[in-house]
Amino acid sequence: MRENLLDFGATFILLWIIMFIIVFSDSLSWPAVPYLIREFLSEEPAVVAVLGLSLSIFNSTKIVANILGALLGDKVDRSLVVLLALLFFPASFALLLFARDHIWIIGSYILFGIFYGILAPPLNAMVASSIPGGSRGTLFGIFNLSWIVSQIPAPIIGGLLSKTIFLRFPLILSLALSLFTLILFIVFRGTLRNTAAQHRPNPSYETKDLTELSSRRLLLLCSAQLFSGLGSGVLSPITTAYLIYALKTTTAEMGLAYSLGWALATAFAQIPGGKLSDKLGYKRVIVVSTLISSPLVLLLPFSRTLEHFILIAALSCFSGNLASPAFSAYITVLMGEKKLSKGFGLTSASFGVGSIVGPIAGSFLWTTFQPNYLPPFAMSSISFLLTLPFIATLKEK
């Protein structure tokens, strides 16, 4: 029994480290990408349009890959599916590093979509399988810190390196780290594979009623994520555009905004959110979190300084991300071990569907109403609030 617990602990820690390096590598490149696009397309509307198009193409590719990851993750060795995904990671950075025009950047986003789409369902299922039921929310919060904490220093470092050395230097580091991640996973894959095999349930007969209940729950979860993805998708290009064109930030300042306004605030929310969800219930935390965070998005376009923008973004991200560990734990409870990859994969795909429309809509509203920036931020806020009817309808029994 003690050996099994140690194995599960090792699995959790290994997955935490791997996810940390993955997101650190990705975040390191964030501040440079908009300015890389601006080298190829000098006009503001064109830069914003390519940002929106790239994000939408990323999410389109990710949706298809999510479905593939969901199907494979519940049928074959989950560690093998993760390894398959990791093969696409270095190639994504290579396209960015050697980009000759904006088409190369769009191509890199396609590969990023394949990578994250295949990766997410089996990886989240492996995490869910490695943690005990009584503290799911708290432990999901701790795991979420892997991809959140890594975003705190990485954009700042990436922005400073782009400014002080040369624009593409962070992309060299990202490529090196992505190759290291692939090697690390190959070396420790045996530990991850053995733990997953021990915890995989034996096939059992499911009644028609149970299957229908599971499908209904999944439909509601997916519907909520659809609108959540729409809200996030709208926000992605317009926040970047607001920082560049309204607040006139440098690459270093943009890195600071991402690190403090999003990553640090999101990190502080994880453990409190997880503990609250374990104590008060997953649904309650999700609902209250959304009600508080969504209206704050409306205040972002009224920011006149970088400090003001970071403060509002941080408050919105902190309150909104209290629900993050609760939602992951809620999927685990509602779907069960046998359908974990399906649950995580299809909810992620639904989020992606919303994220396809979101960046295009956000970019369109930006270019249509500028210099009135409120409409795209309002669309994002409303989309987040539309998740609530679906969450409220969910029942565990």
Image: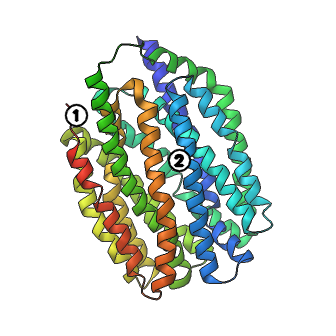
How many C-alpha atoms fall within 10 Å of the one at disc 2: few (<14), some, or many (≥20)? many
Label 1: which residue? 396
Q: Is residue 396 left or right of residue 64?
A: left
- Judging depth in this view, the residue of 91 and 269 nearest the camera is 91
Vertical placement of residue 138 versus 60, above or below? above
The reply to whether callout 1 and callout 2 are in contact (CB within 8 Å) is: no
Furthest toward the bottom, the residue is 371
Vertical placement of residue 339 versus 153, above or below? above
Q: How is the image coloured?
A: rainbow
Badge 2 amino acid: Ile
Label 2: which residue? 63
Q: Decide which of tag 1 and tag 2 comes sooner along the chain.
A: 2
Query: Callout 2: helix, strand or loop?
Result: helix
Q: Nearer the viewer, mark 1 or mark 2?
A: 2
Residue 91 in percent (x, y) is at 74, 48
Tell me the residue at 73%/76% (across/down).
39
How many C-alpha atoms fall within 10 Å of the one at disc 1: few (<14), some, or many (≥20)? few
Q: Is residue 111 left or right of residue 279?
A: right
Tell me the residue at 46%/13% (across/down).
3
Badge 1 amino acid: Glu
Residue 280 in percent (x, y) is at 18, 42
- Judging depth in this view, the residue of 9 and 325 nearest the camera is 325
Is residue 17 visible in the rendered image? The answer is no
Query: Callout 1: helix, strand or loop?
Result: loop
- Judging depth in this view, the residue of 200 and 169 nearest the camera is 200
Residue 158 in percent (x, y) is at 64, 63
Tell me the residue at 67%/73% (across/down).
35
Tell me the residue at 25%/24% (across/down).
209
- Judging depth in this view, the residue of 153 and 176 nearest the camera is 176
CA distance for labels 1 and 2: 27 Å
